[in-house]
Image (cartoon, rainbow, N blue to C red):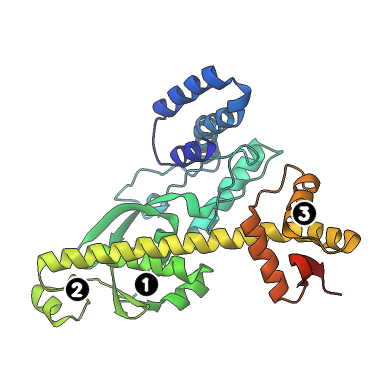
Amino acid sequence: MQRMLADRLLQKRTDFDQEMSVLELLKLRFGDNALQACEVMMRDIFDSRRVDAVVRNDQDLTRKPAVSTSSSDDEDIPELHAKILSHFFWPEIQEQDFNVPEEILELQQRYAAGFASLKQSRKLTWLNGLGQVTVELDLEDRVFVDEVSTWQATVIYAFDSPSDDAVSKTANELAEELDMSVALVRSACLFWVSKRILAEVQRDTFRVLEVLPNEEDEAVGGTGVSGTDDNAGDTSADTAAAAEAAAAAAAKESAEAAAMEKMNLYWQFIMGMLTNQGAMPLQRIVMMLKIAVPGGFPFSNEELREFLAGMVAKGKLEIISGGNYKIVQ
């Protein structure tokens, strides 16, 4: 319930009447205590609106109306809004780490300073991968406006150039520049290919499509887009599907890395048990961990078996008779 509610509350919406109604019904059925975390999550979202307005006003982050006679760039400042989550009450969120554009980072720093002055006992940790961005791309023959994820917006921003020449970049270059996983970079690039903003000129090399090709250019295949409208639609759909698959692969990679990092915390428990009590089978290790770890051991037997197999491969453990695991001295 918490995970489902979190997914819905993090969406860019103005009202959550349905979620409030469901929460009230569940509280009647299961009691207030069982739904305390969900209640805090809901309160966070509504409190965030008030806090967001105060911080933006105090830090002068409110977008100023564009005045044609003004030489100021104030109207070009991106609007930054935040939802502020109580860390201990929300379910664990798999975060994709990457470097946001410098101007967004500066706005985040100003926002964080305003929040710190308002809530002196609390500090913001930005979860950049969870946001939504309304982007406006001014291309040579068109203007593209859409709402995309923060990592998709970050990747297309990296193609920005003051010159009129179309920029080409490889997935590896973008991954290094943005400190983003290659799988996530490729997913974002394929998304923009499906929107006909980028073209994949070579494998994992992408170029900005400043001007949409005409039918003759498409028939030649210079942009990698098929010549007929039907085929172009099929190609776009295939590319979008490939982008989703790449995004899923990146999410899985991030989740596995996070799980491995958490599992490493329990390695100290396992080493202590095997050192003090000698070799143990998997079932006994699991039983001991459930007793020793505050809050219980969160992984399945199979996940622990895979982790221990990795430790065997690294030479830190060995399997002796009866399938018992033993510390390698």
What amino acid is found at the position of numbered circle 1 in the picture? Answer: Ser
Instruction: Determine which residue is flagged by label 1.
Output: 161
Nearer-the-camera pick, 65 or 281: 281
Disc on res. 284: 3
Task: Give me the residue at 84% from left, 58% from top.
Answer: 273
Whether tag 3 and tag 2 are in contact, CB under 8 A, the answer is no
Q: Residue 52's x, y, as percent? A: 52, 37
Q: Quadrant for residue 233, please give it.
A: bottom left
Please report whichever mark, 1 or 2, sits nearer to the chain's N-terminal start: 1
| Viewer-proximal residue among 201 and 249 | 249
Instruction: Please state which of the two labelled residues, at mark 3 or mark 1, is closer to the viewer.
Output: 3
Please state which of residues 32 and 277 is positioned toward the viewer in this rendering.
277
Q: Nearer the viewer, mark 1 or mark 2?
A: 2
Residue 225 image label = 2
Question: Which residue is the extreme one toward the front?
Answer: 322
Mark 1, residues whose alpha carbon is within 10 Å: few (<14), some, or many (≥20)?
Answer: few
Disc 3 to disc 1, C-alpha distance: 60 Å
Q: Where does the image place residue 39, in percent across and percent down from the top left?
A: 56, 27
In the picture, the quarter occupied by the C terminus is: bottom right
Measuring 69% from the left and 76% from the top, which residue is drawn there? 313
**Within-10-Å neighbours for mark 3: few <14, some 14–19, many 20+:** few
User: Do the CB atoms of the residues marked 3 and 1 lie less than 8 Å apart?
Assistant: no
Residue 298: image location, x then y, percent = 66, 48
Helix, strand or loop under label 1: loop
Is the residue marked by circle 2 packed among few (<14), some (14-19), or many (20+) residues within 10 Å?
many
